[in-house]
Each structure stands twice: as C-alpha cells, then as structure tokens.
Amino acid sequence: MKRISIILLYIGIVLPMFSQKTYTLKECRKLAVKNNIKMRDAQMSIEQAHETEKNAFSKYFPNVSAGAVYFHSNDYLIKKDVSLSEEEQQGLSSIISQMGLNPSALASLPSSYSFDMLKSGGAAQIVAMEPIYTGGQITAGNKLAKLQTLVKKLQMQQSKDEIVSSTEAYYNQLITLFEKMKTIEAAGNQLKRIHQDAENSYKGGLSTKKDMLTVEIKQNELIANKLKVENGIKLCKMVLAQYIGMNGIDIMVDTTITKDIPEPSSYLVDHTSAINNKVEAQLLDKNVEANVLQTKMKKGALLPTVSIGAVGAYADLVGNGQANVIGMATVSIPISEWWSSNHTVKHQKIAEQISRMDREDNRQLLIIQMQSAYNDLDNAYKQIQIAKKSIEQSTENLRLNEDYYKAGTGTMSDLLDAQTSNQQSQDKYTEAVCQYLNSRTAYMIATGREVF
C-alpha cells in the first residue's frame, strides 16, 4: 500500500512537470493577439462602425411616418339652430310643387331645426417621402461611413503591431533573464574552482586566508544577484502571462537563444516605396478622403432637396369614414443658409488643405522613422559582433589570470576581476541579441511588413 502511494505521488507531482507546455514566441504572439484587451476593443469598434454604415445606408429608403387621433366630447362640438321664414317656406313650397309633389306635405314639417355634430370621431394618416436629390449628402454620408470602417480596421492593425512588438519585448526580456541565470550558474562553478585553488594554496602555504575570504565575498554577491534574477523571472513571467491572456498561470517559454543573426541588409527595403504599405500612411490618406467627403456634405447642405411621396389618410368624424391617397412632391431650398453655411464650406475647405499638408509632412517623418529603425537594427547587429569579441577576449583573459594565480605571479583580485569581466561579456552578448530581435521586429513593422 505504501508503495502504491509513492507511485501515485510521483505521478501527481513529477509527471505534470514534464507535461507542462513550453510556449514559443510565435505561440505567445498568437495568444496575445487573440486575448489582449486592445484587440477586443478594436474588434468592437469595427462592429460599431458597421452599424454606422447600416444607419447611413438606411437614408436611401423612404422616410415613413404615421399618426392617428381619436376624440370624444361630453357635448357636440357643432350646434346650430335653423328656422325657415315664411318667405323661405313659400319658396320651398314652390320647389315641391315643381317636383310634382303635394305642397300640403310641407305643413306637417317643422319650420325650425336643430343640428348637433362632432361629438366623437377619429382620423389616421401615413406619410412616405422618398428623397430624390439631397445635394449628394446621402451618397457622401454612406462613403464616409464606409471610410470610417476602414479606418477602424487600420487602427486594429496598429493595435496588432503594438501587441506583437510588446509581446516580443516581454518574451526577450524573459530570455535575457534566463541567460543571466545560466551565466550566474557558470560563474558560480568558476568561483567554486577558484575557491578550491585558493584553499589549496592556503593549505600549501602559498597564500593567505584573505584570498579565500575574497572569493567567498564574491560568491555571496553572486547569490544575491541570483535571487534578484529569480525574482525578475517570476515577475516577467507574470507580466507575459497576463499580456497573452493566461493570467495567474506559471507559463514556460522556450529559452533557447537564437544563433541565426542575419545581417541587417537582408531586411533592407526601399523606404519610399514601403511607405505605401505602412498603416500610418494609409490612415493619413483616409484622413484626406474623409475631409473631401465632409466638404461635399457641407456643399450639399446648400443645394435644394427634392422628395416625392404619398399620404394615406382616413377620417371618420360624422359616422361615415372615408379614405384618401394624396401624391406629393416637395422642393426645399435653404435660402437663408447660403450666407451662414457658405462660411462653413470655406472652413471645411481649409481643413481639407490642412489634412493634405499634414499628410505630406507626416509621410516624410515616417520615412525618417524607417531609417531610424534600420539604424537601430544595424547598431544592434554591430553590438553583437563587439560582444562576441569581448567574450573571446574575456575568456582568454580569465584563463591567463587563472594560470598566473596558480603560478603565483597573479593576484586574487586580478583573477576575480577577470571572472567578473567574463560574466559581464556573456550578459552583454545576450542583451545585444535580444535587442537585435526587438529592433528587427520594430523595423519590419516600421516598413509595413508582417512579422514572421
């Protein structure tokens, strides 16, 4: 029974360690794009823009309105007493005689009457008006709505580029910390060897105990640095996990540092041509288009509006309902608007000119930004070459100082300085590689290309 418990404990603790997924940079990017709040916000903004499109398209349809009224009064609204004079009665008798009727029937009729009308009733109507001409406002409004959707999509691409870049920065920061941990462990092994040599020299009477204590102090510093790096790894993993939508999960990443470092020239493109692929340049174009459409709408507001339609009406006021259909055509000319709105059109034309000038200026700045991004990539590549030479030199310097110390011609201080220099050169190489990778991504995005 005890053996079975041990096996189950092994399965429950050890196996999950081997089954824990290790995420690559590409996988982290996909997760970040899928789960990051900025992308979800951008997607909802696109949905909003689609609704605006549908609303603008509905302006092509007839404008239909309907209404109804019913009333009931406590008394008749129309009251009239009518009395026939003798002269009117004689005239009426003459008319009856001409009709071939007996005039004596008139004597049985009253000579005065009372009329009571409109105590209750109702009426209803429905009006449908179709705009035939609105000065191009509806067409321009629909184009503007579609343009806004395109802008939202471009802004979503901007968010995606930012997320991809930030994800790689967090990922590479984690790699840097893991590489520093490897360097610290390697330095720890070196110090163990140096400490052993110092101890042997002390026991052989070739050195004092001071050398041993100096190494031990250095070892303590290394332990303190290791704790800092461990805490940094924990924090960086938390940040990356939250950014890719796996908050609270202790994720594992592929910490293998790449050795594939192509020359920057392999990524170089013509910046003047590449600017057309850049999201920011496309947004500048859309801004100009939007201002052109707004100018058309302002001008359209000064033109006549023509509509045709029909009115269907039903009224029942005296107990005899009647329905009617009336065709209509309307022309509206905004005469008073010609004075005030004319200045509005001029104001919008100036805004259109400003957008064009801003586009040209910002396109030039974007080209400068591309060149700056390439310069950063080139500088990062050169830093890697320098770091490689530094590693070679510091490694050789460490070997020589170990030999000098063993031969008694070198000091412990020189040996530890050489060891520190070697550790720092290793760290600088890792930092240079990660900076190169970040700069490469930044340059790809700056030139409007997909990040691989």
Image (cartoon, grey):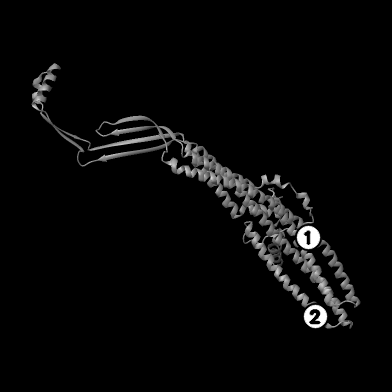
Asked whether residue 151 appears in the rendered view, the answer is: no
Give the crowd class for mark 2: few <14, some 14-19, many >=20 residues within 10 Å.
Answer: some
Q: Going by the image, does 238 lie left or right of 199?
A: left
- For the residue marked with disc 1, what is the amino acid? Gln
Sequence-wise, which precedes: disc 1 or disc 2? 2
**CA distance separating discs 1 and 2:** 36 Å
For label 2, the residue is 213
Give the crowd class for mark 1: few <14, some 14-19, many >=20 residues within 10 Å.
Answer: some
**Label drawn at residue 436:** none
User: Residue 76 is drawn in which quadrant?
Assistant: top left
The N terminus: image quadrant: bottom right
Residues 291 and 319: in front is: 291
- For the residue marked with disc 2, what is the amino acid? Leu
Residues 153 and 248: in front is: 153
Residues 333 and 446: in front is: 333
Q: Going by the image, does 313 lie left or right of 182?
A: left
Image position, residue 264 (x, y; %): 77, 52
User: Which dot, 1 or 2, sits closer to the camera?
Assistant: 1
Image position, residue 267 (x, y; %): 75, 49
Q: Secondary structure at mark 1?
A: helix
User: Residue 68 is drawn in which quadrant?
Assistant: top left
Residue at (43, 33) in percent of width and height: 307
Residue at (78, 75) in percent of width and height: 218
Image position, residue 322 (x, y; %): 30, 30
For label 1, the residue is 383
Above or below for 45 versus 141: below
Residue at (68, 68) in percent of width and height: 231
Q: Secondary structure at mark 2?
A: helix
Asked whether residue 339 appears in the rendered view, the answer is: yes
